[in-house]
Amino acid sequence: MSDYLEFEQLSEIDDVLKLRIKSECGGFAGIADCYVNDEQFQKFCSQLSGFPKKREESLQFSSGENVQLSYFDITLSCADNSGRILVALKIVSIDGRFPRDTVHAVASFSFKVEPAQFDRFVSGLHRVSEINNVGSKAVLLSEA
């Protein structure tokens, strides 16, 4: 399977957007269920339309680092003059089922994607960011 990034909207709790992020790159993989501020995530999604406008432009979003909750960081930047986009991810899954020992699993990697793939992903991500759209997914596949 090629490298990929997937966001899926899960059932909300107390009007907070809950996302499952899954990604795989070069045999490494990460998955985490994360809570995000829906307004900040929607703002991030709107910034992705037409990205990148300049070669040196980059965008970053984090669900917010927390010692008790899983989180993710994503950075998008222009990879080259052909418009390919570099996706850099850090996914931290925190399992708090065991009160004495919190288990952390961390996946961190990057991959490049073609502009057409990225545009399809942005379209899907807008659906994922809409409240009460449980089960909606956005998938970004690498160029490989």
Image: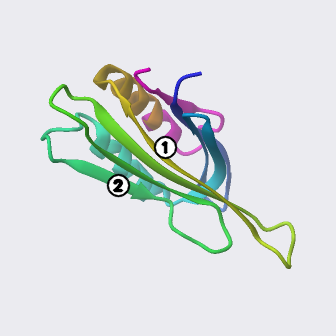
Residue kind at label 2, given as amino acid type:
Gln
On screen, residue 57 versus residue 2, left or right, reads left
Residue 60 circle label: 2
Residue kind at label 1, given as amino acid type:
Ser
Q: Residue at the far bottom: name it.
A: 100
Query: Which element is circle 1 on?
Result: helix
Residue drawn at x 68%, y 72% is 68
Q: Position of residue 27 (x, y in %)?
A: 61, 35
Residue drawn at x 35%, y 54% is 60
Residue on which disc 1 sits = 129
- Quick check: 102 above or below 25? below
Label 2 packing within 10 angstroms: few (<14), some (14-19), many (20+): few
On screen, residue 120 versus residue 54, left or right, reads right
Query: Which element is circle 2 on?
Result: strand
Residue drawn at x 24%, y 37% is 51
Question: Which quarter of the image is occupied by the N terminus?
Answer: top right
Residue drawn at x 18%, y 47% is 57
Q: Residue at the far front: name it.
A: 26
Number of labels in the image equals 2
Whole-Å distance between the Cαs marked 2 and 1?
Answer: 16 Å
Asked whether residue 16 appears in the rendered view, the answer is no
Q: Position of residue 112 (x, y in %)?
A: 37, 32
Q: Position of residue 34 (x, y in %)?
A: 61, 56
The reply to whether callout 2 and callout 1 are in contact (CB within 8 Å) is no
Q: Earlier in the sequence, mark 2 or mark 1?
A: 2
Q: Where are the magenta residues, as a range?
A: 126-144
Q: Mark 2, mark 1: which one is toward the viewer? A: 2
On screen, residue 122 versus residue 31, left or right, reads left
Question: Which quarter of the image is occupied by the C terminus?
Answer: top left
Q: Is residue 141 magenta?
A: yes
Residue 46 circle label: none
